[in-house]
Amino acid sequence: MHLLPLLLACTPTTPEDTGTTDTGTPAVDSAIDVVDSAETADTAPTAPTGHTGQSTATTGDTGPDPCEQLASSPLNVVPLPGYPTSEEIAFDAFGNMVNVDDGANAMFRTPYGGPTTLVAPYDAIEVAGARFLPDGDLALCDEWEGAVVRLAPDGSRSVLAGGLISPNSLAVKSTGDIYVGGYGEIVRIHTDGTIERVFERTNTDFDGLALSPDELTLWINHDDGGVVGHLDLDANGDVISFSTVVELNGSLDGASVDTCGNYYVVTIAGVLWRVSHEGGSQRMADLSSVGASYTTAARFGSGVGGWQRDHLYVMDRTGGTLWDVELDIEGSPMAHWP
């Protein structure tokens, strides 16, 4: 067990809010179809990364650093209605959004534009974090049961870890190790099945776990407290230190990281923030101004089947809409993607 000192940020930032534009609503066939079998993955290159997630430099003068030239607001925002809702979503290697809707007690997958496929029943009171493992199975937080569960593509399941304290969020290393944020603790599930508590803080509900592209930074947030921080990791994934980065306004939820190492987190009220490794923060957009009501997840697309790698897909759980937020930077590649 590692008990690490905490540094508390004291000055919230309040950058200028930016507007968004509704340019149309691509329809999704919301009818439930039976499971299709055999799928084949597309292929797409992924960029090498440096220590903070930035693309490694090439020789010669390549002009301005693109990580220093990012737009201060989304290029476009489009509502995508008709997708099954859930607290979290994940994108597989075959062009599907996959999620477990605890209201419908089922696991679904949906290609861009539909139709939605019912994969298997999943009876649960509350399902939270969901991330794919390198082998293509889905790991999810069954929060009420205190467990991290592995779901195969056909929906069959097994328990990866039990006895956890309200597990809420996941981040997966390329090695297959899983970091889990819960109430008062962050644990690491090693590929051999051992469970290690790597960080703890009383009365803190850890959420929004996301790894930098080089896997040396594990971003986290305290959802009710608005605090964003990160754990610095060594090459083996062991915790070196913790830093509080910034304190934001709002109740924080799901999050992702781009290829430059920036952290994107959405509040449940629809505000999308971008936070740099050094602590700069920017209020990118207020999705409530275009109709969002209860946003819980923000995930970059896989680059397969219409889900774009430079788009964040934000789940509006009660509004029944997936918000397609176009950016000018791609998300950090996932190990299971082609």
Image: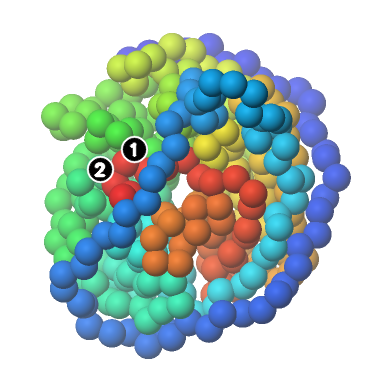
Q: Nearer the viewer, residue 117 or 188?
A: 117
The image position of residue 102, as x and y in percent, is 37, 66
Name the mark on residue 183: none
Q: Which of the 4 quarters of the picture holds residue 335?
A: top left
At x 38%, y 45%, the residue is: 45
The image position of residue 5, as x and y in percent, is 53, 12
Q: Is residue 163 above or below residue 198?
A: below
Amino acid at circle 1: Val
Name the mark on residue 172: 1
Q: Is residue 335 above or below residue 104?
A: above
Do tag 1 and tag 2 residues touch (Cβ < 8 Å)? yes
In the visual, does 262 lie left or right of 232?
right
The image position of residue 191, as x and y in percent, is 18, 32
Label 2 secondary element:
loop
Q: Nearer the viewer, mark 1 or mark 2?
A: 2
Residue at which label 2 appears:
134
Q: Whole-Å distance between the Cαs marked 1 and 2?
A: 8 Å
